[in-house]
Image (cartoon, rainbow, N blue to C red):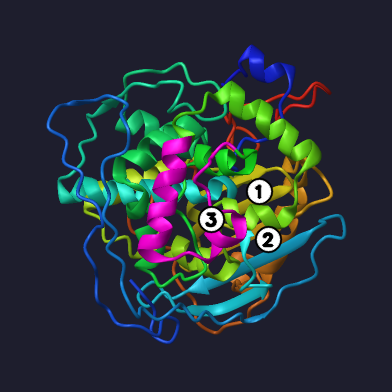
Amino acid sequence: MRLPAPPRFRRKGRYLLLAGALLAAGAGWLARSDGNRSQALRAAVAGGRLQEHPAPQEVASVSVGLPCLQAPGGTQAPPAPARLSGRLGLYVAVVDPVTLEPLRAVSHDPGGVFPLASAYKQSVLWALLKQRDAGTLRLSETFDVSSGSQSLGDYPFDRSDVPTLAARMIHSSDNTATDLLHRRVGLQAVQDVADDLGLCNTRLILPTKDWWTAQAGLSPHFPGAATFASLRGPARLQAALALDADARHSRPDTLQRRLDDYFDHRYTPDTDLGTQNVSTPAEFAHLVAAEFLHSGLSADSQEFQRRLMATGFGRSRLGVPLTYFGGKGGNGWRVLTYSGYLHTAGGEDVVYAFMQHGADQEYTMHNTPLAFAWINAAMRRVLLQADGGDVVTDVVTSPTAAPGSTGKGSNSDTGLVNNTDPVIRRSDGVTSSP
């Protein structure tokens, strides 16, 4: 099933679906202490039904002096396909499941900062399940949708509970479902996913509607892209909360019209880096590894997480024998991202993060085959011969399913970049159909 675009979006609309196409620290990879800090926000809910209201008061609790991730880049990745344009980033690694240290890695611009698009949504799921385990969020909570809470893309599904929203967020990459859950757990709680891992170049704090509001010029409180990109800790949280309040005063149709004007007349790629959620290939690959191998979740929550992430896009595009796959990615205006974790039939744990920014193409989903051709070429450089790679070893590892895996065949891709992403059509008739 694919969500139809509302008529007002069909008349005019850019390809602004942060579509979901689509790593607890390692010795030597993370040079920092093991201290865990508490959640920045403990939002208790008394009733079983949560109406859509302004976000609760948040208080920043930011670690001071937390050393940043120092991720080795490994060897140079094979050349990217010639038709992949713009800035490109890639990180592919076999990681130690205990330390998360990369055992073999290849990369291209591993420390470059790129927009994440919908790949960031997996961090919302992780933050949500942490709060579920802490007892501050119940899966039975339900939500109503107002024009203020609706993001780009149609969303006629009031009274959805948390599991329904989470499934739509990961499998369908639904923007409104994501924003409802992101605001429910708190903006800082999602940012904590990165901060707790020492990912100093990773920003996860903004719901989808917020960064579009900033780009459209609909937030009188937004300090500007360059200033916002430089903020950290409590200052960033306060700026994000002010932007979020402005976003919740915007109707989605008004936002779409203003975005059309922005992309037609005022767009600059550098602005993406100061308005959207961002990361680097190396940092995001580590987040993915930690998410699957060191989540800190209860057994029930980890199973829930793995089951949903297995519905993300990418498994059918990988030329690797595997027993489990979980992935998430996204696309936007000249932006494409893919990320994933897999446990190979040979028993190894592999992560990847692909990023494209400033592509020649406005609509980037057609670059998916090229992106995975590059990912697969890089994987062959790090995988054992038993897994279809080029690495020779005398050690034979028996095929073993990853802890909590759903087994081979648990997910088949049913569409490009998560087959039910919202479709926003432009007057030229191009859509995001697979």
**Mark 3 to mark 2 CA distance (whole Å):** 10 Å
Q: Nearer the viewer, residue 410 or 277?
A: 277
Q: Report the residue marked by disc 3.
A: 340
Q: Nearer the viewer, residue 194 or 287?
A: 194
| Numbered disc 2: secondary structure | helix
Is residue 234 one of those drawn in magenta? yes
Residue at x 36%, y 28% (from the top left corner): 164
177 in relation to 387, above or below: above
Question: Which of the two discs, 2 and 1, labels the residue nearer the N terminus?
Answer: 1
**Mark 3 to mark 1 CA distance (whole Å):** 11 Å
Question: Which of the two discs, 3 and 2, labels the residue nearer the N terminus?
Answer: 3
| Numbered disc 1: secondary structure | helix
The image shows residue 80 at horizontal and vertical percentages of 79, 64
Residue type, numbered disc 1: Arg
Q: Report the residue marked by disc 1.
A: 317
Residue type, numbered disc 2: Ile
79 in relation to 55, above or below: below
Residue type, numbered disc 3: Gly
Looking at the image, do the residues carrying marks 3 and 2 touch, with CB atoms under 8 Å apart?
no
Q: Is residue 281 left or right of residue 26?
A: right
Q: If the image is split into quadrants, where does the C terminus sit?
A: top right
Looking at the image, do the residues carrying marks 2 and 1 touch, with CB atoms under 8 Å apart?
yes
Question: Which of the two discs, 3 and 1, labels the residue nearer the N terminus?
Answer: 1
Q: Which mark is residue 375?
A: 2
Q: Magenta: predominant secondary structure element? A: helix
Is residue 101 one of those drawn in magenta? no
Report the residue that reaches farthest toward the front: 220
Q: Is residue 50 left or right of residue 222?
A: left
The image shows residue 223 at horizontal and vertical percentages of 54, 53
Residues in magenta, as a range: 218-246
| Numbered disc 3: secondary structure | strand
